[in-house]
Image (cartoon, coloured by chain):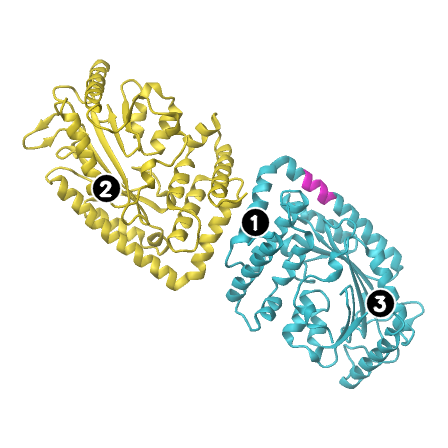
Chain colours: A cyan, B yellow
Amino acid sequence: MIPETMLQTGRSPWMDWNGPENDIVLSSRIRLARNLEDIEFPTTHSLEEGKHVLKKIYDAWKEEQQTINVPSYWTLMSELSSLKRAVLVEKHLISPLLASHEENGAVLISEKENVSVLVNEEDHIRIQSLLPGLQLKEAFQTATEVDDLLEKSLTYSYHDSFGYLTSCPTNVGTGLRASVLIHLPGLVLTNRINRLITAVSQLGLVVRGIYGEGSEALGNMFQISNQTTLGKSEEELIEHLESVVHQIIQQERLARETLVKQSNIQLEDRVHRSFGTLKYARIIESKEASQCLSDIQLGIDLGYIKGLQRPLLTELMIQSQPAFLQLGAGETLSASQRDVRRANLIRSRLKEELKEE
Amino acid sequence: MIPETMLQTGRSPWMDWNGPENDIVLSSRIRLARNLEDIEFPTTHSLEEGKHVLKKIYDAWKEEQQTINVPSYWTLMSELSSLKRAVLVEKHLISPLLASHEENGAVLISEKENVSVLVNEEDHIRIQSLLPGLQLKEAFQTATEVDDLLEKSLTYSYHDSFGYLTSCPTNVGTGLRASVLIHLPGLVLTNRINRLITAVSQLGLVVRGIYGEGSEALGNMFQISNQTTLGKSEEELIEHLESVVHQIIQQERLARETLVKQSNIQLEDRVHRSFGTLKYARIIESKEASQCLSDIQLGIDLGYIKGLQRPLLTELMIQSQPAFLQLGAGETLSASQRDVRRANLIRSRLKEELKEE
């Protein structure tokens, strides 16, 4: 069972590690989809089959855990309240779909929160590896290690010409989804973001908001990932995404330079006003908070704001989400109550970090 | 000649004195209009007649100044640059009309800036007395003392049945205009201000913005004054205005109570956000600055904000005006340059007052 502390902060231990291009790329994620041989996929399997899958994977974890030196926690969805499950979604440790699989869902989370294994989500197994900055290859390396470890005790559903078989055809093949969470305030402020999204889509990649499909790009954060996994090797998929991300980084840096050159004082004003808002507001909606946090992050990157570290903002972004606020309050909160709690939380956290009384 | 220091701060010495109802009534002002006998009024007089008036009043001041112990400064409009004259207008020490009378205009200002005598404005003499809070009677007392002093050496144009004769018929009679500068954020926020303005107008009083006729009610500050001076005694005029102001004060207090009761957290949020804006903005327009200053003043009155004194805000309101900003900068500034300078000035003044680094 995951420790309570994991649910109390939006800051995951891996966020404090350093990563390349970390001022623009917040995190890199690799997800591998796997299914066990000769058992129906979760989308169609019976409750009993689900239980069987759970047991097999639990046993494999128990078996292999001893051979490695990385503490991890096995947690059934049924052990967690819906609020706690929602917090794990907000931390990107599980998916909304897994959170809804109360009967048969489970998750394995490593102590540093950089690895999680989702059990009985859309597929039997989804291995996820997270790292700060642009580190897709490194994240893939970690995911592969976990994959290899589990495969010692389990037999995957694999087709010689198709590759790994999955519930959804888009995952068949490598079963790999590589994605980055990227902060693009420069491209948004210079109105170049829509053109970029169109261009990226034409390259077979998908751009989404911070909380996945259909979610809004809160705080100018975007998820960019590969769309299909069939017909290419893992390395090719990762390299393709990485090369596109490198180009986006370059575009973002150019946009920031343009902003500083053309409207330095306007930009400084915007950044500092957002800082003032977060330090003083008593009521703040999620959208405004995210926008202000994005502005502050840009301000830190450009040297306008001193004394704040970057992971704090990712942390506050996550902790500002509804489930986090409610879990912290110990009760269900209305939208307007959340707005008050969000403002208080951000205010006191900023004070703490800035070492003000 | 007025000292340079008078032009460097928006804070007049009299603002630091205490006054009744000072949380709502910022200042009380009495103005007496007088003209010299047998000389054309300034609206029609020749340049030579104007010079003659100037000399007579200057001599009277020289003569009487020795008998009293209040230092004061005689300054010709022609001695001041247009920017300096504009600063005196922004400080309410002279009128825009006097500032435009470069050939013959002059002003006498007492050291504490609570008394000024405008020479060759619309009338030969306009005696003005200012006090903090609701002190119309006390301000009238001061103005009368100055009036009596000047009358020792001068003969006023006076008609036995009409009273004092003036350029504009609305001033004939007592020549008195009594006014208060009043801060009504409660009535504005509860949308009761328009009804109040209508009611006050029906009582023979006029409601204007902070910079007189036609000016907008910047920062929820309103000037309320009597409209006519004929047919009533000075005491009656003052008492009428005072009794109406007492009713407005009561209405404003009720409105503030309602706001606190009905929307405490929204109000607190508004006040603190305005505080954050003034403490952090790098660009701020006059209108927004005034609104934020009004919010902060309300916040001080309601106890939401600690560590700030009220005159600071009146001071900042005045110092945020265009002429002040340009005189301080030592150069002509465009509107957008003023917005930057205004933000810097307010920010550093607040830091100073809050004793922050």
Per the image, the residue denoted by label 2 is B225
Pick the residue in front: B173 or B56. Answer: B56
Say whether residue B339 is left or right of residue A137: left
Say whether residue A159 is left or right of residue B31: right
The vertical placement of A267 against B185, above or below, is: above
> Is residue A138 visible to the viewer in this orientation of the structure?
yes
Please state the extent of the stretch shown in magenta in the rendering: A251-257
What crowding class fits label 2: few (fewer than 14 Cα within 10 Å), some (14-19), or many (20 or more)?
many
Same chain for marks 1 and 3? Answer: yes
Measured as percent of width and height from the top left, residue B261 is found at 37, 64
Residue A35: image quadrant is bottom right
The vertical placement of A90 against B189, above or below, is: below
The numbered disc on residue A274 is: 1
| Quarter containing the N terminus of chain A | bottom right
**Disc 1 and disc 3: Cα gap in Å?**
44 Å
Measured as percent of width and height from the top left, residue B303 is found at 40, 55
Q: Nearer the viewer, mark 1 or mark 3?
A: 1
The numbered disc on residue A172 is: 3
Q: Nearer the viewer, mark 3 or mark 2?
A: 2
Q: Secondary structure at mark 2?
A: strand
Say whether residue B231 is left or right of residue B312: left
Instruction: Report the amino acid beneath label 3.
Output: Val
What crowding class fits label 3: few (fewer than 14 Cα within 10 Å), some (14-19), or many (20 or more)?
many
| Dominant SS type (magenta) | helix
Q: Secondary structure at mark 1?
A: helix
Measured as percent of width and height from the top left, residue B234 is found at 14, 39
Pick the residue in front: A186 or A87. Answer: A87
| Pointer 1 or 3: first along the chain | 3
> Is residue B166 visible to the viewer in this orientation of the structure?
no
Instruction: Report the amino acid beneath label 1.
Output: Ser
